[in-house]
Image: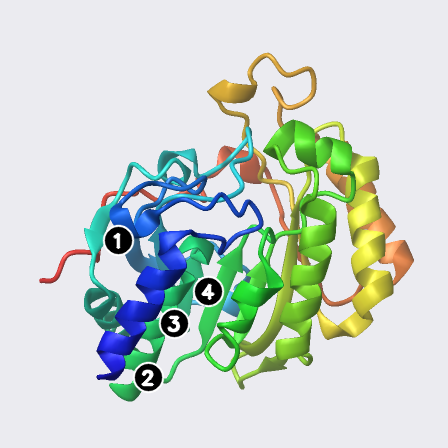
Amino acid sequence: MEKENMQTETEAIFKKCTLCPRECGADRAEGKAGRCHAGAMVRVARAALHMWEEPCISGSEGSGAVFFSGCSLGCIYCQNREISGGQAGLDISVLRLSEIFLELQAQKANNVNLVTAGHYVPQAVSALKMAKRSGLQIPVVYNSSGYEKVETLKMLEGLVDIYLPDFKYMSSKLAEQYSGAGDYPEIAKAAIQEMVRQQPQPQFDERGIMTKGVVVRHLLLPGHVREAKRVVDYLYTTYRDQIYMSLMNQYTPGPAVKEDPLLHRRVTKREYERLLDFAGELGVTQGFYQEGNTAEESFIPAFDCQGVEKR
């Protein structure tokens, strides 16, 4: 009976979908794709151990990353563009999704890491409840663009242990220019506030692996050090030691931005140093930074449906 109720509730939500801030109203229950490029079925492009998250997330064992297809934001410089358009991946049932969570736990993953799952929150909630009833015990990470509705995040309360959102912009102008979402700054501020409300204090196990908390990421864009400083200043002033920050320099330009006057190139060493110096002078101590020429490394796995189909 509970399973039937969950299915009915999901169908009602998807009949006129407003899960994300776009509130496009697509009839996903009938298979019509919303702004997120997703229909009614959960589509997953990869489910496997992932070694390239922050040290407190991946550790040496790996994070159990489940990469969902589609995205409600759609940045022109997207680093996961292969799946953000919703084409890559396989459609699976909620039951299969719950099995994947348990399989990742059996592989000794430090956590289950839901990567860009905002447009599948009702199914993710159902799958997590199923998996927890069947023995899922490792922490659950919600890995997000930060472009989330508070009402949707509240559906995850009690199920998500670690929130891993981006905070991309303080400037509405840049948010509109690069992501077609001029409301991003205010949406992300409210979303992160809700995430911190749910998980107000970082906690770690004896290995230094995070078990609860919020880690906010910012990807430094070329030519936008001033914007990055504004993001860091806001986060530190607002939350201090309630959150960790992850400042990244791994931006890699793709075909869609080859003509852009700023985004066509990688971040320079000097740009990144300026951001890290600012964070240090501000007093940020709970954070992560990247060493070396990370833009030349591959943090993007092959979206080959590994771990998605049942063996």
Q: Residue at x 79, y 36 (%)?
A: 225
The amino acid pointed to by label 3 is Val
Looking at the image, residue 69 lies above or below residue 107: above
- Of badges 4 and 2, nearer the viewer stands 2
Residue topped by disc 3: 125
**Marks 1, 2: nearer the viewer:** 1
- Which percent across, then down, holds residue 58? 46, 64
Q: Give the image location of residue 180, x and y in percent.
A: 61, 32
Q: Please report contact status of discs 1 and 4: CB closer than 8 Å, yes or no.
A: no
User: Is label 2 in a helix, a strand or a loop?
Assistant: helix
Tell me the amino acid under the disc marked 1.
Answer: Met
Give the mark toward the camera: 4 or 3.
3
Disc on res. 58: 4
Q: Residues within 10 Å of mark 3 (few under 14, many from 20)?
A: some
Judged left or right of residue 298, residue 277 is: right
Q: CA distance from mark 4 to mark 3?
A: 23 Å
Query: First in sequence: mark 4 or mark 2?
Result: 4
Mark positioned earlier in the residue sequence (4 or 3): 4
Tell me which label, 3 or 2, sits earlier in the chain: 3
Checking the image for residue 41, the label placed there is 1
Q: What is the distance, in whole Å, between disc 1 and disc 3 at their CAs? A: 14 Å
Q: Is residue 244 visible?
A: no
User: Which quarter of the figure has residue 164?
Assistant: bottom right
Vertical placement of 190 versus 254: above or below?
Answer: below
Given residues 18 and 63, the one toward you in this image is: 18
Q: Position of residue 128 (x, y in %)?
A: 35, 75
Describe the element under mark 1 as helix, strand or loop: loop
